[in-house]
């Protein structure tokens, strides 16, 4: 399988319109990663979807134009692009419409799948099998994606305590869901 | 689309710390650059994010029984969840129910937690026979309260009944009853 850098090089080296497969493959690989970056920083699925389209369409454009000189550092390039676009999105920039009008039709529609659904009944049972502190930390943490320090302040614990409990709880939850240990 | 394996996979603890903003700025930058260049670690982060979202969804649907805090219940109310709250003092008895409009139910147990190192929560039937217990529940000794978010599916299924709750405090090798509380439950439509 070609690396991301190899795909980027093939796009940069191709004649106009001759690298659509490589562009589609690169877009499909990078979209889920950029989407997660967007969810992490924007905490909004639609905004994250906008980020994906803006960043990747501009990246493809810059590859075609030979503006990305070090394809082996593509991740670093995309990180910088993500930061810039997140700032734009937070400021409500209209860059999106301009970019999409120019390039959206060039790429076959690439669906960015959301996370797969879990067996919620099994998750519920696995949560019930956790220790009380573990379950409390997970509920308080994940309801609003709060930091360890925020949760620690409510429980009279240290942030380090909370992180240890959190990591242990997630490990046990993951193992239970993978059926490595029974839910008790 | 195949995903190659990673030569230096990010640990699950690092992934969740990243997702929750618990890394330093320098650590976060390193992790983000790795994630943007690695399909395998990105996929693992996606799975973790799906898990956290599912936990949140279960809690929001009232399907997780957990000791929480008053601040957490207040945040739920602020997010427009309909939370039925009951407040009990030691030796107290309360008439309770749930309605179809209630999203969640929370019980606040007033209790003096000073001097204890561990608290157990025990629920008994009307005759005092133990039905269920939560051992070593989290608590803040400085906050004279235990707050429990109950599972709505189980509460809704309860017939008319009396439940007794005991909070047991452990201090060294000794244990003592910190408080006893009584719930007189009436099913929906017949309640107080």
Image (cartoon, helix red, strand yellow):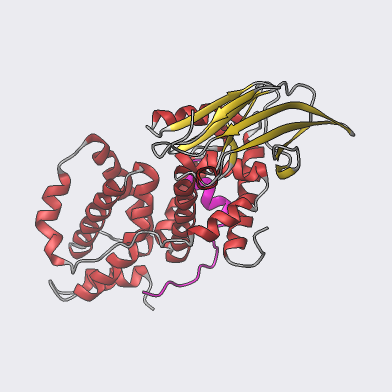
Q: Is residue B192 magenta?
A: no
A110 and B41: which is toward the camera:
A110
Whole-percent x and y of residue B98? Answer: 48, 36
Residue B166 placed where, x, y %?
73, 32
Instruction: Examine the rendering and report whether any part of residue A174 can be seen.
Output: yes
Relative to B43, A125 lies left or right? right
The foreground one among A121 and A130 is A121
Whether residue B85 sits left or right of residue B117 in the image: it is: left
Q: Position of residue A94 (x, y in %)?
A: 15, 42
Which is nearer the eye, B68 or B148? B148
Instruction: Identify the residue at horizontal 90%, vertical 34% (top origin).
Output: B173
Q: Main secondary structure of the magenta part?
A: loop
Q: In the displayed orientation, state which residue is furthest to the bottom.
A: A1
Q: Is residue B23 visible?
A: no
Instruction: Count the numbered circles shown.
Output: 0
Residue at the right extreme? B173
The residue range painted magenta reads B1-22
């Amino acid at each position: 399988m070609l690396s991301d850098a190899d795909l980027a090089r093939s796009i940069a080296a191709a004649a106009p319109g001759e690298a659509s497969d490589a562009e589609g493959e690169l877009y499909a690989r990078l979209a889920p990663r950029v989407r997660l970056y967007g969810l992490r920083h924007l905490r909004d699925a639609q905004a994250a979807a906008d980020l994906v389209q803006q960043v990747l369409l501009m990246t493809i454009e810059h590859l075609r134009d030979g503006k990305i000189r070090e394809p082996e550092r593509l991740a670093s390039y995309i990180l910088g692009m993500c930061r810039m676009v997140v700032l734009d999105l937070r400021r409500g920039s209209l860059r999106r419409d301009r970019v999409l009008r120019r390039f959206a039709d060039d790429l076959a529609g690439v669906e960015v799948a959301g996370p797969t659904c879990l067996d919620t009944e099994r998750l519920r049972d696995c949560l019930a099998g956790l220790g009380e502190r573990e379950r409390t930390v997970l509920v308080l943490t994940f309801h609003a994606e709060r930091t360890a320090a925020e949760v620690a302040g409510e429980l009279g614990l240290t942030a380090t305590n909370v992180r240890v409990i959190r990591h242990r709880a997630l490990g046990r939850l993951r193992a239970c869901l993978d059926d490595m240990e029974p839910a008790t | 689309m195949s995903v190659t394996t990673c030569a230096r996979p990010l640990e699950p603890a690092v992934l969740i710390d990243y997702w929750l903003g618990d890394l330093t700025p320098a650590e976060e930058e390193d992790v983000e650059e790795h994630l943007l260049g690695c399909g395998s670690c990105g996929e693992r982060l996606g799975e973790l994010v799906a898990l956290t979202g599912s936990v949140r969804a279960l809690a929001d649907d009232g399907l997780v029984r957990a000791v929480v805090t008053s601040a957490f219940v207040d945040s739920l109310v602020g997010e427009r969840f309909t939370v039925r709250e009951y407040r009990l003092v030691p030796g107290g008895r309360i008439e309770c129910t749930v309605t179809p409009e209630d999203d969640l139910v929370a019980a606040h147990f007033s209790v003096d937690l000073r001097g204890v190192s561990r608290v157990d929560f025990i629920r008994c039937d009307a005759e005092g026979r133990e039905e269920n217990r939560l051992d070593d529940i989290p608590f803040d000794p400085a906050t004279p309260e235990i707050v429990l978010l109950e599972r709505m599916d189980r509460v809704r299924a309860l017939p008319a009944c009396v439940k007794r709750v005991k909070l047991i405090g452990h201090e060294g090798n000794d244990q003592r009853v910190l408080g006893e509380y009584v719930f007189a439950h009436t099913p929906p439509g017949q309640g107080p």
